[in-house]
Image: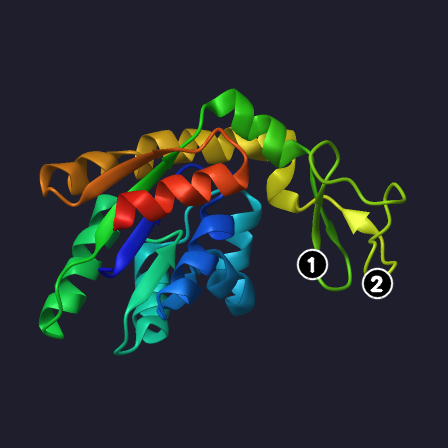
Amino acid sequence: MPDLVILGPPGSGKGTQAKPLAEEHGLTYVSTGQLLREAGGEARRYMDKGELVPDELVVGLVRDAIGDGGYVLDGFPRNTAQAEALDAAVSQAGREAPGAVLIDVPDDALVERLSGRRICAAEGHEYHVKFRPPAREGVCDIDGSELVRRADDEPATIQNRLRVYHDQTEPLIAYYEERGRLRRVEGDAPPDDVAHRLAAAVE
């Protein structure tokens, strides 16, 4: 399998699908969301407002995380400038540019997914008020900590995140498609179904 970029709007299930796919093929899974959350500071302030983190900050973090091995990227690139920077970096290292898969989900389904998501305050275990509720409302099944809504899952922030995606990230679809490096997967389905479609698309 080639090095791979997983594309899709917020809440499309990129992380759910990308990590097991990377593990199955022995590739490094790189979540830029996780990288940025760990970076904190300025990066976190952008994320909490539903805005994109500046390119120079993200590109440096991703370049370090990729290293020399194969990879699956979740959440990067988010605009064509980042895609060009990634292509240039791997080319300079003597590697082929990555392929891309788009997990496509309608906006109304995304709003329902994201606004209902909850995480435990202690370890970040994820739940959903409709699709994966805890045994006791508001309490993590694993460690008993309080379940909270992430700042970037507030309804107003979700709408802003989707606007940012359509304005700045969606052009990546054309970028990869024009270069013959894009596959599309319908993502408004149960995770196992999406996983099968994704596996078929990258083979």
Q: Can you give x and y, in whole percent of width and height, for residue 134 in the image?
A: 81, 45
User: Badge 1 is on which residue?
Assistant: 124
Q: Amino acid at mark 2?
A: Asp
Tag 2, which secondary structure?
loop
Taking depth in this image into account, of 1 and 117 the one nearest to the observer is 1
State the mark number for residue 10: none
- Residue occupying image coordinates x 54% and y 57%: 44
Q: Can you give x and y, in whole percent of width and height, for residue 56 in the image?
A: 30, 62
Q: Quadrant of the N terminus?
A: bottom left
Q: Would you say 91 lies left or right of 127 here? A: left
- Residue occupying image coordinates x 85% and y 58%: 145
Q: Can you give x and y, in whole percent of width and height, for residue 96 in the image?
A: 12, 63
Taking depth in this image into account, of 45 and 128 the one nearest to the observer is 128
Q: Can residue 59 be seen? A: yes
- Residue occupying image coordinates x 17% and y 40%: 175
User: Badge 2 is on which residue?
Assistant: 143
Taking depth in this image into account, of 13 and 146 the one nearest to the observer is 13
* Label located before the other in sequence (1 or 2): 1
Q: Residues within 10 Å of mark 2 (few under 14, many from 20)?
A: few
User: Do residues under tags 1 and 2 come within 8 Å of each other at their CB atoms?
Assistant: no
Mark in the foreground, 1 or 2: 2
Q: Amino acid at mark 1?
A: Gly
Tag 1, which secondary structure?
loop
- Residue occupying image coordinates x 36% and y 54%: 54
Q: Can residue 77 be seen? A: no
Q: CA distance from mark 1 to mark 2?
A: 10 Å
Q: Can you give x and y, in whole percent of width and height, for residue 63 in the image?
A: 29, 70
Q: Would you say 58 lies left or right of 34 here? A: left
Here the colouring is rainbow
Q: Quadrant of residue 121?
A: bottom right
Q: Would you say 20 lies left or right of 99 here? A: right
